[in-house]
Image (spheres, rainbow, N blue to C red):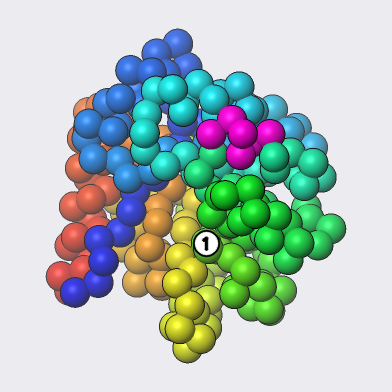
Amino acid sequence: MAAQPLIAPSILSADFGHLGEQIAAAELAGADWIHIDVMDGHFAPPITMGQVIVEACRHITELPLDVHLMVENPDGMLQSFAQAGADHIHVHLEASLDIGKSLQRIRKLGCKAGLAINPETPAAKVLPHLKLADMVLVMSVHPGYAGQDFIPEVLPKAAEFRRAIDSAGLDTRIEFDGGVDAETLPAALEAGGQVFVAASAVFKYPQGIAAGLQALRAASLTSLRR
């Protein structure tokens, strides 16, 4: 049986007035990682959060902190985010001057290295770097605001990554970020996804954080049993 998919709630949709309580509730409900979306207002429209938030999250939880840098010139920030407590750092291929060097530096800092790509970026640009990436983060929305609809056109690209990873015998994980909920998760799982970032589907779920996570977990387990 395939390994159970991992759910990484994104605090982009959390109530920052009660951030500690919200992260604790997600952890208690079975979250696997905590995802932190860092945007600089240039690479992605909003300005969101930075090293101070990562450091605060590190004090709140022992869950792995999955830090997604949607920023220009990310290489200059890698050490500071590692020092703040990031366990994983994702850098966008579109923002890095040399994605191979970026991934190697992340690993040297003691973090898992993630290669993130926008929906329009072709698979061919990613395939040569799979051996250096611990994760490939497939953006299934355009970088920016939470609450966008899932872009299904990215699914064939993720499936291509899955085939290449399996063929090469790599441990690289495929992570989906954007528009993930109980309706869209099964298709992403079928395409080869293993980690699923969910913001609104957890922190703005009508019945609460625990119910949101339960809905995602149920959707994933139902898909695995098919």
The quarter holding residue 80 reads top right
For the C terminus, which image quadrant? bottom left
Reply above or below: 143 against 194: above
The residue sitting at the bottom extreme is: 167
Does 84 sit left or right of 152 as displayed?
right
Res. 160 visible in picture = yes
Apparent side of residue 188 relative to residue 224 in the rendered image (left or right): right
Q: Residue furthest top?
A: 17
Q: Nearer the viewer, residue 78 or 147?
A: 78
Q: Secondary structure at mark 1?
A: strand
Q: Main secondary structure of the magenta part?
A: helix
Residue shown at the point (69%, 40%) measured from the top left? 79
Q: Residue at x 81, y 45 (%)?
A: 73
Q: Which percent across, then down, holds residue 137? A: 55, 58
Range drawn in magenta: 80-85
Crowding at mark 1 (Cα within 10 Å: few <14, some 14-19, many 20+): many
The residue pinned by badge 1 equals: 135
- Residue at the location (23% across, 55% down)? 219
Relative to 49, residue 36 above or below: below
Quarter of the image with the N terminus is bottom left
Relative to 47, is 20 on the left or the right? Answer: left
Q: Name the side, left or right, on which 193 lies relative to 136.
A: left
Q: Amino acid at mark 1?
A: Met
